[in-house]
Amino acid sequence: MACVRGSGGKIVHFVRHGEAMHNPRAEALRTAGCTFDEFLLAMAADDVFDAPLTTLGIAQATETHSSLLGTSVAPEVVLVSPLSRAIDTAKTIFPCGPFFAVDELCERRGWLLNTKRRRRSELAAAYPLCDFAALSEDDELWTEQLEEWPSCSARGRAALERVWLRPEREVAVVCHGGILDAILGMRDDVHADADLKGRFHNAECRSAELNLDPDGVSFQLKLITRG
C-alpha cells in the first residue's frame, strides 16, 4: 500500500534504550559469540515484568544526552516504545520531548515478561508528560508465545510509516534492539545503509535521512554522520 505525504525527507534519530535488568548476562554472552537461542535463554533467566533500567542504563542514557549537546540533533517530537526502559531513556536523552507512546515500537513480543507493558492508566500516572492516547488500556498484543520475526518486521514497517506521516521533519525514535533490527534489516521495502543495520549498543543513537521512493512504497534510510 502506498504511503503518501508531502515532499522532502525527514531526519530520524534511532535510539536503543539503556541497559535494563534483563540485559547484562545476555549481552555479555552475545558479545562472546553465543547462539541466539542461548541469548534468549539468558534473558529468560533474568526476566522481569517491564524490565526497568539499571544504574548503568541510566548512566548510559545520561552520557548519550551529554554527547548530543552542542550538536545539530534537535528532534521536534519523540516517538517511544511504551516499555518503561525506553520511556526513561527517552526522557533522559531528549528531556524537552514532546513524547508519544507507540505500541508498534515495543520489543519483539511474547514469552518474556520484559516485553509486556504496563496498563495505560499506570503509565499515564508514572509518566504524565508522555501521551499514551494511542494505546489500549491493557497490553492486548503480548502472548505466551514469542512473536515471529515477520510479525515484528511488519510492526516495524508500520512504525516507520507513522514517522513518515507525522508533520515534524526531525523525529527521535526510542525503542529496542530487536525492533530496530526488524525495522532496519528485515524488510524488502526498507533499504537502510549497512552502517545503520548493525546491532545497537545500549543508549546508542544513530541518525538517518528517511525518504520515500517514487513508488510510494519503499523507504530509503541514509546514515547521517555527526562530526
Image (cartoon, rainbow, N blue to C red):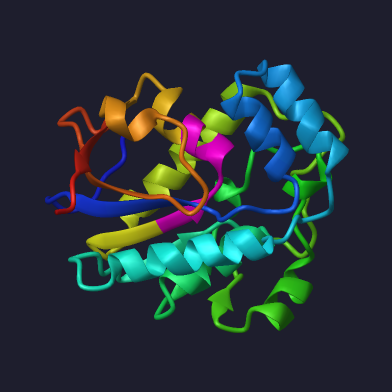
Residue 98 left/right relative to 83? left
Tell me the residue at 43%/65% (across/down). Answer: 63
Q: Position of residue 155 (x, y in %)?
A: 54, 38
Q: Residue furthest top?
A: 35
Residue range highlighted in magenta: 173-181
Closer to the camera in the image, 146 or 93: 93
Is 83 in front, or is 124?
Answer: 83
Q: Residue at x 56, y 74 (%)?
A: 131
**Who's the residue at 66% across and 18% down the image?**
34
Picture quarter with the N terminus: top left
User: Of 83 and 220, which appears nearest the observer?
Assistant: 83
Q: Position of residue 220 (x, y in %)?
A: 23, 33
Image quarter where the C terminus lies is bottom left
From the viewer's perspective, is 18 left or right of 213? right
Image position, residue 12 (x, y; %)? 30, 52
Can residue 78 be seen by looking at this rendering?
Answer: no
Q: Residue at x 68, y 54 (%)?
A: 20
> Which quarter of the figure has residue 18?
bottom right
The relative height of residue 83 versus residue 220 in the rendered view (above or below) is below
Relative side of 149 to 153, left or right: right
Label count reads 0
**Could one spot residue 177 in this view of the protein?**
yes
